[in-house]
Amino acid sequence: MAISNAGTSLEGFFLIAMPGMEDDRFARSVVYICAHSDNGAMGFVINKPQSMSFPTLLTQLEIVSSPDEIRLPEQGRDILVGVGGPVESGRGFVLHSNDYDSESTVPVEGGISLTPTMDILKAISRGLGPRAAMMVLGYAGWSAGQLESEIASNGWLTCPADFDIVFETRPEIRYERALAKMGVNPAFLASEAGHA
């Protein structure tokens, strides 16, 4: 685990946007942090779905010639394709359970791994992928000290990530669930934001 400027790494943590988040791209976002060191941080927004379905994405990437070729159980067809962040928005990444491994798989924390290659999409299309996965396009990145500054300015709350929130919770309620994990009522947070 890398150590950040603040003394501890946030790898495997959630960033939860405060109600006053000025950057609209991150309003009401939950970001899963995959890498954090003195050089900066990288993570993925996990609660902003794309309109594209996973079978459509596999077809567009020519992994399969039609959605009917995908050998997935029905729930596998519902793999979320999300907006991972504003950086390299055309590049895909798969966050997944740690029961899938390849040369490019990076274990993060809490049973969650990251694979940034097409191999995992091919494995998923053949029914050989991980038991839980979500595809994200793009990522969120911070330069050295930037994330620590945003946290110190009350832009983000942080808490250890939760596997079930990433993979088992509907995207539209992940923000509230992440806050609830911290014992925070979103209504109270919104009404108290900005008050000393």
Image: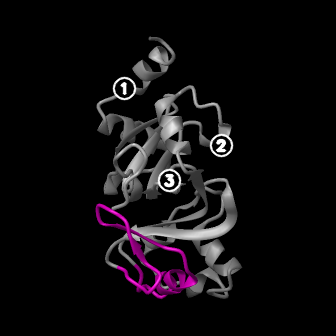
Amino acid marked by disc 2: Arg
Residue located 40% across and 19% down the image = 188
Residue located 43% across and 78% down the image = 105
**Could you say where residue 157 lies in the image, as x and y percent from the top left?**
42, 35
Q: Earlier in the sequence, mark 2 or mark 1?
A: 2
Q: Which residue is mark 1?
A: 185
Quadrant containing the N terminus is bottom left
Q: How many neighbours does mark 3 have within 10 angstroms: few (below 14), some (14-19), or many (20 or more)?
A: many
**Frontmost residue, 95 versus 170:** 95
Quadrant containing the C terminus is top left
164 relative to 133, above or below = above
Image position of 131 (left or right of 135): left
Q: Which residue is mark 2?
A: 25
Q: CA distance from mark 3 to mark 2?
A: 13 Å
Q: Which secondary structure lies at badge 2?
A: helix
- Residue 56, by quadrant, is bottom right
Marker disc for residue 46 = 3
Q: Which secondary structure lies at badge 3?
A: loop
**Could you say where residue 130 lies in the image, as x and y percent from the top left?**
38, 77
**Could you say where residue 53 lies in the image, as x and y percent from the top left?**
61, 66
Magenta range: 100-129
